Amino acid sequence: MEHTVVRCAEGHVFSTTSFPMQQAERLGPGRLVRCPKCARLRSVVPVALEKR
């Protein structure tokens, strides 16, 4: 499984193994995922990782 690093609406950054519907462009980049820090369903967006 591929891990995706995401940021929730509260600003918490975490990785998730399931980032559903990544190809659905009409819905935009955000998805609802349970944040492990907030313990709530939050809107999350992928984080662009910088390459070193």
Image (cartoon, rainbow, N blue to C red):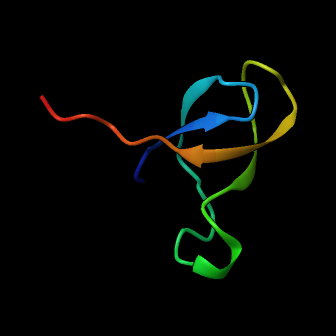
Q: Nearer the viewer, residue 48 or 21?
A: 48
Q: Farthest residue in the left direction?
A: 52
Relative placement, left or right, of 38 versus 1 is right
Compared to 2, does 36 lie above or below?
A: above
Q: Farthest residue in the top direction?
A: 37
Find residue 27 and report its horizontal and vertical position in percent: 70, 74
Relative placement, left or right, of 49 versus 20 is left
Tell me the quarter of the picture where residue 24 sits. bottom right
Compared to 48, does 20 lie above or below?
A: below
Relative placement, left or right, of 39 versus 46 is right
Query: How many numbered dots are placed on residues in this image?
Result: 0
Relative placement, left or right, of 9 versus 12 is right
* Residue at the image position 67 percent from the left and 44 percent from the top: 44
* Residue at the image position 25 percent from the left and 34 percent from the top: 50
Tell me the quarter of the picture where residue 10 sits. top right
Find residue 28 and report its horizontal and vertical position in percent: 64, 68
Find residue 42 and report its horizontal and vertical position in percent: 81, 40
The image quadrant where one finds the C terminus is: top left
